[in-house]
């Protein structure tokens, strides 16, 4: 297993966990782009958004439910937060294991980048 996030999901590498359940793991980003920057990953290896199909709908719902829980526990739910999936290198994806960024704790600019 060479995928960094798969190693985290398997417990081989210990990230700073914020939330976890049987389907997803949420942990603090090592290179935060906002005061709160948490990544929500599926425990199942899926490389990019392009690799999803309709069978993944329940998993995506769990990822967004985890993002909501993270926002609540981190105290950013009421002020506002952003969720982002990057797909492939040109969009900024650097680890090819699907992950949802949860960003908050400051005002966000639009358009983003």
Image: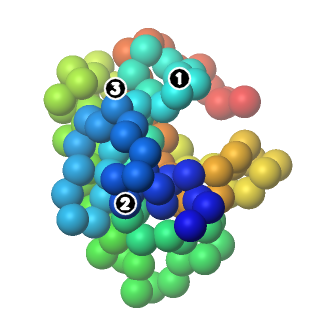
Q: Give the side of residue 109 with respect to residue 6, left or right.
A: right
Spatial CA distance of label 2 from label 1 is 23 Å
Q: How many numbered dots are placed on residues in this image?
A: 3
For the question of whether residue 69 can be seen, the reply is: yes
Name the one closer to the observer, 26 or 103: 26
Name the one closer to the observer, 88 or 110: 88
Picture coordinates of residue 84 (x, y %)? 52, 44
Mark 2 lies on a secondary structure that is loop
Q: Earlier in the sequence, mark 2 or mark 1?
A: 2
How is the protein colored in the picture? rainbow
Which marked residue is nearer to the observer: mark 2 or mark 1? 2
Give the numbered dot on residue 32. Answer: 1
Q: Give the side of residue 53 with respect to residue 76, left or right.
A: right
Q: Residue at x 31, y 58 (%)?
A: 24
- Which residue is under mark 2? 10
Q: Can you tell which quarter of the image residue 70 is in?
A: top left
Which marked residue is nearer to the observer: mark 1 or mark 3? 1
Q: Earlier in the sequence, mark 1 or mark 3?
A: 1
Q: Residues within 10 Å of mark 2 (few under 14, many from 20)?
A: few
Which marked residue is nearer to the observer: mark 2 or mark 3? 2
Q: Residue at x 40, y 86 (%)?
A: 55
Question: Can you name the residue that lies furthest to the front here?
Answer: 12
């Amino acid at each position: 297993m060479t995928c960094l996030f798969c190693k985290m999901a398997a417990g081989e590498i210990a990230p700073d966990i914020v939330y976890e359940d049987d389907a997803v793991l949420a942990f603090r980003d090592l290179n935060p782009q906002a005061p709160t920057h948490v990544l929500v990953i599926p425990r199942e290896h899926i490389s990019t958004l392009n690799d999803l199909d309709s069978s993944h709908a329940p998993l995506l719902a769990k990822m967004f439910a985890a993002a909501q829980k993270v926002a609540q526990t981190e105290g950013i739910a009421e002020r506002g937060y952003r969720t982002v999936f990057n797909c492939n290198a040109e969009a900024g994806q650097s680890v090819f294991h699907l992950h949802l960024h949860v960003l908050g704790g400051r005002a966000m600019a639009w358009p983003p980048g």
